[in-house]
Image (spheres, rainbow, N blue to C red):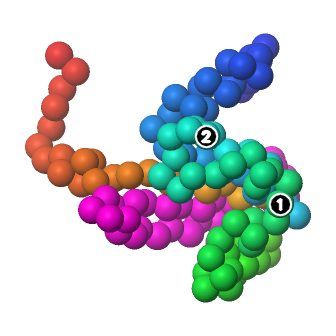
Amino acid sequence: MIENLTKQELEAILDSIPVEISFVDKDDKVRYFNKEERRIFPRTHAVIGRKVQQCHPHKSIHVVNQILDDFKKAHRDIAEFWIKNKERLIYIRYFAVRDKEGNYLGCLEATQDITEIKKIEGEKRLL
C-alpha cells in the first residue's frame, strides 16, 4: 500500500533495493529504471519511451518478444536467466505486472549480481 509517498521518497526506496529494476509498459515501451549511475547494464535517459526491443542486442530480440508475448497472453508470469559477466554471476528475472483483475500492465525486469550470494553457507543470525 502506498500512502503519501513523495516522488523523491519512492525513487530513493527503489534505488535502495539491492536489485536493478526496469519497467516496460503494455506497449513494450521502457517507462522506468532505477540506479542510473550504478547499473550492471548501464542505461541512459534516452531509453525512456523507446521500445524495449531497441535496448537489447539484435540476437536476443526474438527471446524478448517471446517473453513479452507469453506475458501478454498469460501463458506465464516469470522468465529467468543467469549469465556470466566477466567473473560475476548475474541473475536476470522478468515478471509480468498485472492489475487486480489480471490485465497485463507491463513487465518488470530485475537484475542482480549474485556472485557473493552464491558463496553463502550455513546461517548468520542478526545478533
Q: Main secondary structure of the magenta part?
A: strand
Q: Tell me if residue 79 is in the magenta stretch.
A: yes
Disc 1 element: loop
Residue 109: image x %, image y %?
A: 61, 56
Disc 2 element: helix
In the rendered image, the vertical position of residue 84 relative to residue 3, given as above or below: below
Front residue of 73 and 25: 25
Residue type, label 2: Glu
- Local crowd size for mark 1, using a 10 Å CA cut-off: few (<14), some (14–19), many (≥20): some
In the rendered image, the vertical position of residue 69 relative to residue 35, given as above or below: below
Residue 89: image x %, image y %?
A: 33, 61
The residue labelled by disc 2 is 36
Q: Tell me where residue 3 sits by quadrant.
A: top right
Residue 59: image x %, image y %?
A: 61, 85
Q: Tell me where residue 62 sits by quadrant.
A: bottom right
Res. 70 visible in picture:
no
Q: Pick the quarter of the image with the N terminus.
A: top right
What's drawn in magenta, residue-wise? Answer: 75-104
Residue 45: image x %, image y %?
A: 75, 46
Q: Tell me where residue 85 sits by quadrant.
A: bottom left
Label for residue 50? 1
Q: Pick the quarter of the image with the C terminus.
A: top left
Residue type, label 1: Arg
